[in-house]
Amino acid sequence: MNISALKGRKQITAAFRRGKRFASHSIIVHVRDRSHAGEHDAPQGGHMDLFVICAVRKKQVPLAVTRNRIKRIIRECVRSFCAEYPHIPFMTLAFVWQTPMQSPKEAATVDIKPQVNDALHQAMQYFSKQ
């Protein structure tokens, strides 16, 4: 399974508006499953690939260095999650960071990874019941 960035205005808007929402302490993730893969606002290759986008508000995290670090950590957490679970039912993952941070030192993998895993486990449980 390839993990790539979600691109295109229609796809990004659909991921945030039509995705099922799961929350952890600092992260909200909007998940669209593979049943939406053939729709007009779905990315091409939705049957096989996983598309990820991360949004960190400038108002919450003023420094670009910290925002980019949070995004890199989230993407790395998704890669490690996909290594654990090779057959996931997700097509798109849209992450929104909610907690204010002032310095890059506050953005640590050991703090962010459990939150990402918690939100993704909630999504796995929800979509496995359907």
Image (cartoon, rainbow, N blue to C red):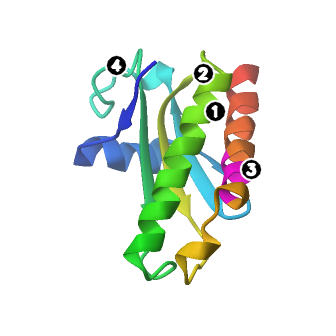
Asked if the residue at tag 1 contacts the one at tag 2, i.e. Cβ–Cβ closer than 8 Å, the answer is yes
Magenta includes 120? Answer: no
> At numbered mark 1, what does the secondary structure look like: helix, strand or loop?
helix
Which residue, given by chain and number where applicable, does mark 3 sit on?
Answer: 114
- Which is nearer the N-term, disc 2 or disc 1? 1
Q: CA distance from mark 2 to mark 3?
A: 18 Å
> At numbered mark 3, what does the secondary structure look like: helix, strand or loop?
helix
- Tell me if mark 2 has few (under 14), some (14-19) or many (20+) residues whose alpha carbon lies within 10 angstroms of its own: some
- Which is nearer the N-term, disc 2 or disc 3? 2
Residue type highlighted by circle 1 = Phe
> At numbered mark 4, what does the secondary structure look like: helix, strand or loop?
loop
Q: Is residue 108 left or right of residue 67?
A: right
Q: In terms of depth relative to the viewer, which is nearer, 71 or 14? A: 71
Residue type highlighted by circle 4 = Gly
- Coordinates of residue 100 in the picture (x, y in percent): 59, 79
Mark number displayed over residue 38:
4
Q: Which residues are magenta?
A: 112-116
| Residue 124 visible in image | yes
Residue at x-position 36% and y-position 34%: 4
- Which is nearer the N-term, disc 4 or disc 1? 4
Which residue, given by chain and number where applicable, does mark 2 sit on?
Answer: 88
Residue type highlighted by circle 3 = Pro
